Image (spheres, rainbow, N blue to C red):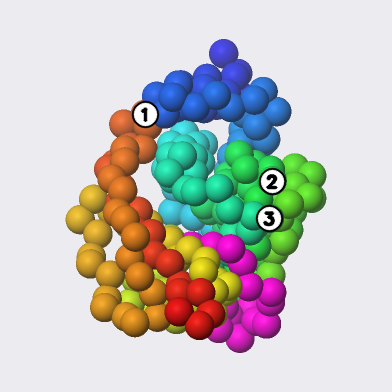
């Protein structure tokens, strides 16, 4: 079995565990994203996951499991997105959602741009700079996977329009969200990443609409 076939089988197995039907095109795109990151990581330090198998399990399928629990939104900002996770897999699985990747480190931003070009992702925009300094149209939702909730709150509020969602992914023992009058916690979801992955927590909070 070739490496590409093994990657496809692993992705299909993961989606089977999630109970999600991904199209052949989506599986191909996620496989291509995994292989592209694996090739780049041989020369550029983009992720701590060094094997293709780890990239698929710990990044791609982790993002896919998260996407299962995200509400439908028209736009999503991924703050501190690193090599583009979870934003790139979410964009592949949610083609109707406009995803903005926000990253301050140039090498990771350059990889994001190459992935967008190579995969033909017309619903993704990569922005280079610090999240608090960029001036962009606000999104329907924003997520910060690699930032502690207490640090993420002002960044997400900056990127979310009134009435929009603030999304805080974390580990099974995720810290409580800080009390803050600028948002209202709506719910917390526990889920497991497929193919032997960990249990995760997703907090969802809402920014009050203007005048409320």
Of the numbered discs 1 and 3, the one sitting upstream in the chain is 3
CB-based contact (under 8 Å), mark 1 and mark 3: no
Magenta residues, as a range?
128-144
Quarter of the image for residue 126 reads: bottom right
CB-based contact (under 8 Å), mark 2 and mark 3: no
The quarter of the picture where the C terminus appears is bottom left
Front-lying residue, 97 or 14: 97
Q: Secondary structure at mark 1?
A: loop
Does the magenta segment cover residue 136?
Answer: yes
Q: Is residue 61 above or below residue 85?
A: above
Predominant SS along the magenta part? loop
Q: Which residue is mark 1?
A: 195
How crowded pointer 2 is (Cα within 10 Å; few <14, some 14-19, many 20+) is rated as few
Of the numbered discs 1 and 2, the one sitting upstream in the chain is 2
Q: Which residue is mark 2?
A: 96
Please state the horizontal and vertical placement of residue 127, each as a whole percent of the image: 69, 70
Q: Secondary structure at mark 3?
A: strand
**Rendered image: mark on residue 98:** 3
Q: Is residue 42 above or below residue 20?
A: below
Does the magenta segment cover residue 138?
Answer: yes
**Residue at 43% of width from left, 44% of height from top?**
69
Residue 57 appears anywhere in the view: yes
């Amino acid at each position: 079995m070739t490496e590409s076939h093994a990657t496809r089988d692993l992705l299909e197995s993961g989606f089977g565990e999630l109970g999600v039907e991904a199209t052949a095109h989506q599986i191909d795109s996620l496989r291509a994203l995994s292989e592209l990151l694996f090739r780049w990581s041989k020369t550029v330090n983009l992720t701590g996951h060094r094997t293709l198998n780890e990239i698929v399990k710990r990044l791609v399928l982790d993002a896919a499991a998260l996407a299962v629990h995200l509400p439908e939104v028209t736009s999503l900002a991924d703050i501190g997105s690193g090599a583009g996770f979870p934003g790139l897999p979410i964009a592949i699985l949610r083609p109707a959602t406009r995803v903005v990747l926000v990253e301050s480190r140039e090498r990771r931003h350059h990889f994001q741009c190459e992935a967008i070009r190579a995969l033909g992702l017309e619903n993704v925009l990569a922005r280079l700079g610090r999240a608090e300094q960029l001036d962009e149209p606000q999104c329907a939702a924003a997520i910060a996977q690699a930032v502690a909730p207490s640090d993420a709150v002002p960044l997400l509020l900056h990127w979310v329009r009134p009435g929009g969602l603030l999304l805080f992914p974390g580990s099974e023992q995720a810290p409580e969200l800080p009390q803050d009058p600028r948002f209202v916690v709506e719910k917390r979801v526990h889920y497991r990443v497929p193919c032997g992955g960990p249990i995760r927590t997703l907090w969802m909070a809402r920014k009050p609409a203007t005048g409320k």
